[in-house]
Amino acid sequence: MISLEQVRQQSKIDKMQVAGLIYGSQERAKEIQQFFLDCEKVPEVQTNADFYNWSRKKQFLSKDKQGFSFMKMINNKVDDMEQYTGPMIYSATTNHYGVYLGMVVPAVKILGTDEQIKAWLDDLINIRKAACYAQTELGHGSDIQSLQTTATYDKQREEFIINTPTIQAAKFWPGDLGILANWALVFAQLIVDDKNYGVQSFMVQIRDVETHKPLNGIEVGDIGPKIGYQVKDNGFLKFNNVRIPKFNMLAKYISITPQGNVIKQGDPKISYASMMMMRKLLNTVYPKAAAISLTIALRYSYTRQQFTNDSKIENSIIEYQTQQHKLLPLLANLFAVVLSGNMTSKFVDFNFNEVQNGNFQHMNACHSLLCGTKANYTHFVVNCAEWCRLSCGGHGYAHYSGLPSIYQEHCPNVTLEGENQIMFLQLARYLLKLLKTSQKNPQKIPEQFSLFKKIDQILQFKCDQFQFSNILSLLESSVIHLITQTGMKMMQEIQGGLNPKSAWDYKLGTSLWESANYFIEYYKFVCFQKTILQVTHLQTQVVLTNLLNLFGITILLQNPLTLLENDVVTQQTIKQMKDQYENLLTLIKPEALVLIESFCLADGGLRTTIGRADGKPYEYTYDWALNENSINQMELTSVVNQLKNCRPKL
């Protein structure tokens, strides 16, 4: 039986160079690694092995001590999301106050005036004003413009009246609302002199600071158990004509004169700023949950032995091509997601720096890219967790493996902050606009979408003999053929009598979704390819290039129909790709362990018995079942005797 340490010793890559790509720099990677090592020494931040035997109430209370211990470790820099990354990765479950730190704080920074920032930011950062992000309602989620909560301006008293006019308008699902929050950043329709000025954001106190009881006119509480987010107090909130000062509307980009005139400035999409920042967080932090899944599954695959080879020796299951087929494409996709997420994060920061200086020209590109990446990445994390669980056989079903909880905790991300199909449609809308722009003003196309500057060249590309150097051109070809066909189909539907909205809603949905998703796969490949250029260690660059090619070929083989239909490739080309795919599995297998361990994750954050660093899955699994399972400490004699006395009635 080969040990994990032997696998590590046989690797030819520079682990810290890879870690530097993952975390932005080798210095940052070392900081994250040290943070994880420090966490191992702090009992308060460990998640109890018996956690999933506990009631939801006990689970919730356990996170209080853990969350504040994390804050102490990072010197309470809770408004610095880069600093907050370590606790979020290590905890492997949702922490208290994470939503408001990730959404409310950025919203106040971006949408608030200097006076509002001075009035609220310090209290928010120090959790004196613990505010939730109260946007989603019972009747409306992704369709933000149709929210029904109202904020009616009273000119005489210079106040807003916040009201819930229907049951559908009740705020429902905001995290940190059910129990923890004493304030809410409420999104409501601004009404002035009976005229609706669209959805704006308002800071509203909902609970008394001393007693934590709801204020007059407020109904608030927890919505109950759900799949995932077990320790998150997602809440409900209703307003009965609650008055707040005029000062409480975030007013950097919208204001109301004493006469009741509404003045707007900048791009209206700026009101989505905090959602954009949360999507940035989903893009950069939460994909590392897939690294947790793969660390567990790959370590287990090297140590788990099943069935004998020709020498009558049991094989490690990673030796089987089917196991490699399950896990190694996921590993390649993980690197594509993380490295493209890093580049997207830089673009988001650049955009908001420009916005602060009054330049809104990058908003559309940034918003659209975030929509597509959020949808693609969150789906990948959940899909990865499920396939990793399946790859671990029976042990993958046990919570002690660490895998079921990752799926449960992260499956809500597919829906929150923008349901994924809606997100893809928003990106697709932007891609169709770029298609028109490419014909009239190609110089206005953003760098992230530069393939639209060479549409004619891409449409002429053909590939009879596959080579790795063709992968980028084939991905470009798939995107452009898909989006041009979608544009042509829309024109045909309109010419056939449908209005554009009906054509969009009822005839083009699957084509739009496919175009947007394929663009993100192409974008991930480009970012991965660019990032590899930073690597100076030759063998590391070779291995990462193999991983990049595996990712590209996997995407192309998942849906070659577009390329075949447009005569870009032949059946022989597809066969050549399949042959190279199988060869890449063999090349990457010896390096997969060190590649995934470049994420520097610690055993405490993995919460696993089968994927620990020392490679002893059976010893830990038996020990936890014997010593950590509270069911085995319960006195059940009376219950068993009662069951014995039950008799079926025929």
Image (cartoon, rainbow, N blue to C red):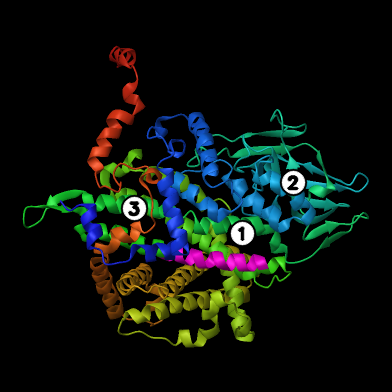
For the question of whether residue 225 can be seen, the reply is no
CA gap between label 2 and label 3 equals 42 Å
Q: Residues within 10 Å of mark 3 (few under 14, many from 20)?
A: many
Q: Which residue has dot 3 on it?
A: 295
Report if residue 345 lies within the magenta region.
yes
* Residue in the foreground of this view, choosing between 613 and 403: 613
Left or right: 104 as drawn, with respect to 92: right
Q: Position of residue 369 (x, y in %)?
A: 56, 67
Q: Amino acid at mark 1?
A: Met
Q: Is residue 330 above or below residue 435?
A: above
* Residue in the foreground of this view, choosing between 268 and 5: 5
Q: Which of the numbered marks, if any, corresponds to residue 203?
A: 2
Q: Is residue 25 above or below residue 563?
A: above
CA gap between label 2 and label 1 equals 19 Å
Quarter location, residue 52:
top left
Q: Name the secondary structure under disc 2.
A: strand
Q: Name the secondary structure under disc 1.
A: helix
Q: Amino acid at mark 3?
A: Thr
Which portion, as a residue range, is magenta? 336-353
Residue drawn where x is 36% and y is 81% of the image: 470
Marks 2 and 1 in Cβ contact (< 8 Å): no
> N-terminal of the two: label 2 or label 1?
2
* Residue in the foreground of this view, choosing between 603 and 448: 603
Q: Position of residue 394 (x, y in %)?
A: 27, 42
> N-terminal of the two: label 2 or label 3?
2
Q: Amino acid at mark 2?
A: Met
Q: Name the secondary structure under disc 3.
A: helix
Q: Which of the numbered marks, if any, corresponds to residue 276?
A: 1
Main SS category, magenta section: helix
* Residue in the foreground of this view, choosing between 67 and 231: 67
Q: Which of the numbered marks, if any, corresponds to residue 75?
A: none
Which one is in front in this view, the residue at disc 3 or the one at disc 1? 3
